[in-house]
Image: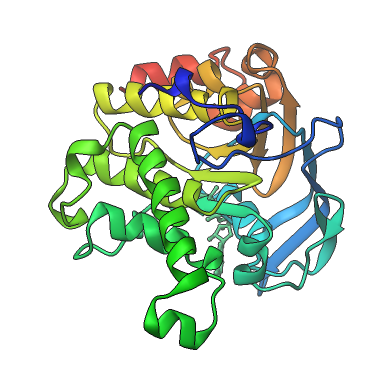
C-alpha cells in the first residue's frame, strides 16, 4: 500500500483503513496561535515577544541560527516550558499552564532532535505505546483481557499496522528498534507520534544526521502526512534545502526575536534574514548557505 491509497482524515468511515488523520475541520481558523510569548532563564531571553499562527492544513517551518530559540518555542508549545508572558491557544483553547501529558492528549504530538524510543522494544511495541492514551478499559477487563479491552486492543493494533504500511517499515515491525538503521529509527519515532492521532505535529529536526536518501524518504513522508492525512505540522530544521522545498510558510527567529515570516522564496530574499544567518549584509540566501555547507 502506498500513501496515496490511504484515506483522507475527514472520511474514516468510508474506508477499511484505520490510520488516524488530523480530523481537523478546514474552517480556516488557526490550529495554533502563539501570541506575544516571552520566555527567559535567569537573564537569558530565549523567546522575546514572538507571535505566529499556523493554519489547519499548513506545513509551517521555524528556522534560525543556533541558539535562536527554536527548541524553546517547541518546549512552550508542548508545555515543557511555561513562559513569563503571552498566550498559546491550541484549537482556540489557552493551553498555557497545562502539563505536557495533558497537551499531548489534546492532540499535540512531537518528535525529538535525539530519538526518544525504547530501544529494546520492537517497532510494533513502540508504536503501540503511542496508542496508550487510547486504552480506555477498566482494570479488571484489562486483567482478564475480555470484552471492551480485547476490542480496543484489536482496534489499536489495526491503527498501528496502517501506520507501519504508511511509513513503509513492514519489514522491520518485529525488530528491536535499537538494531535498526538511524533513518528507520527516525521514521519509527514519526510513527509513534502519528499513533497518538495528532491534530498538530511538531517535528524537531526530522532529518538531522540523515544521508541524502534517508532525507528524501523523510521529506516524502512529511508531505504525505500533510496531503494525505491532513495533519498540520510545525517543522524546525537546519537543512534549508528541505525547509524551502517543503514548507508552506517559514518563520525566521534570531536571538529569540521574530525576524520575518513569509513564503519560502520571500524569506530567502529578505535582507534581515540574510543578515541573521551571516551576521553581515552579504547577499547570500540561507538556502544557498546550507547547500554550500553540505
Ligand atoms: N533550560 C534552559 N536553561 C537556560 N537557558 C536555556 C534553556 N533552554 C534554552 N536556553 C537558552 O535559550 C536560548 C535559545 O535556545 P534554544 O535551544 O531554544 O535555541 P535553538 O534555536 O533551538 O538552538 P539550536 O538550533 O542550537 O538547537 C539559548 O541561549 C539557550 O542557551
294 left or right of 182? right
Relative to 275, say whether 203 is above or below: below
In this view, the residue farthest toward the bottom is 140
211 left or right of 163? left
230 left or right of 92? left
Question: Which residue is rendered at x = 58% and y = 44% of the image?
Answer: 201
The residue closer to the viewer here, 88 or 8, is 8
Question: Which residue is rendered at x = 73% and y = 72% of the image?
Answer: 98
In this view, the residue farthest toward the front is 147
Q: Is residue 195 visible?
A: yes
Badge count: 0
Q: Is residue 279 visible?
A: no
Q: Where does the image place residue 35, in percent across and percent down from the top left?
A: 85, 50
Q: Quadrant of the N terminus?
A: top left
Relative to 294, say whether 193 is above or below: below
In this view, the residue farthest toward the left is 179
Q: Give the colour scheme of this rendering.
A: rainbow
The residue closer to the viewer here, 14 or 115, is 14
Q: Quadrant of the C terminus?
A: top left
Q: Where does the image place residue 276, in percent across and percent down from the top left?
A: 61, 32
Q: Where does the image place residue 149, in percent across and percent down from the top left?
A: 47, 71
The residue closer to the viewer here, 204 or 67, is 204
The residue closer to the viewer here, 38 or 102, is 102
Residue 2 picture quarter: top left
Q: Where does the image place residue 288, in percent across and percent down from the top left?
A: 46, 14
Relative to 53, say whether 47 is above or below: below
Residue 101 picture quarter: bottom right
Amino acid at each position: 500500500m502506498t500513501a496515496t491509497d490511504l484515506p483522507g482524515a475527514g472520511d474514516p468511515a468510508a474506508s477499511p483503513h484505520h490510520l488516524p488523520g488530523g480530523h481537523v475541520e478546514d474552517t480556516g481558523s488557526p490550529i495554533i496561535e502563539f501570541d506575544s510569548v516571552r520566555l527567559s532563564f535567569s537573564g537569558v531571553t530565549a523567546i522575546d515577544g514572538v507571535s505566529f499562527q499556523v493554519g489547519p492544513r499548513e506545513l509551517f517551518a521555524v528556522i534560525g541560527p543556533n541558539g535562536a530559540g527554536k527548541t524553546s518555542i517547541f518546549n512552550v508549545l508542548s508545555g515543557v516550558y511555561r513562559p513569563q508572558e503571552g498566550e498559546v491557544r491550541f484549537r482556540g483553547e489557552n493551553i498555557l499552564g497545562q502539563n505536557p501529558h495533558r497537551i499531548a492528549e489534546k492532540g499535540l504530538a512531537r518528535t525529538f532532535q535525539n530519538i526518544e524510543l525504547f530501544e529494546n522494544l520492537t517497532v510494533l511495541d513502540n508504536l503501540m505505546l503511542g496508542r496508550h492514551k487510547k486504552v480506555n478499559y477498566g482494570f479488571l477487563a484489562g486483567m482478564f483481557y475480555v470484552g471492551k479491552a480485547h476490542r480496543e486492543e484489536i482496534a489499536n493494533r489495526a491503527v498501528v499496522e496502517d501506520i507501519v504500511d504508511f511509513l513503509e517499515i513492514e519489514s522491520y515491525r518485529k525488530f528491536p528498534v535499537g538494531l535498526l538503521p538511524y533513518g528507520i529509527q527516525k521514521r519509527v519515532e514519526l510513527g509513534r507520534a502519528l499513533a497518538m492521532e495528532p491534530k498538530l505535529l511538531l517535528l524537531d529536526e526530522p532529518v538531522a544526521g540523515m544521508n541524502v536518501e534517508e532525507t528524501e524518504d523523510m521529506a516524502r513522508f512529511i508531505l504525505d502526512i500533510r496531503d494525505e492525512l491532513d495533519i498540520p505540522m510545525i517543522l524546525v530544521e537546519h537543512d534549508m534545502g528541505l525547509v524551502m522545498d517543503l514548507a508552506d510558510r517559514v518563520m525566521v527567529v534570531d536571538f529569540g526575536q521574530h525576524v520575518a515570516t513569509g513564503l519560502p522564496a520571500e524569506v530567502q530574499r529578505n535582507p534581515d534574514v540574510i543578515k541573521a544567518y551571516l551576521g553581515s549584509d552579504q547577499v547570500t540566501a540561507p538556502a544557498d548557505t546550507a547547500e554550500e555547507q553540505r
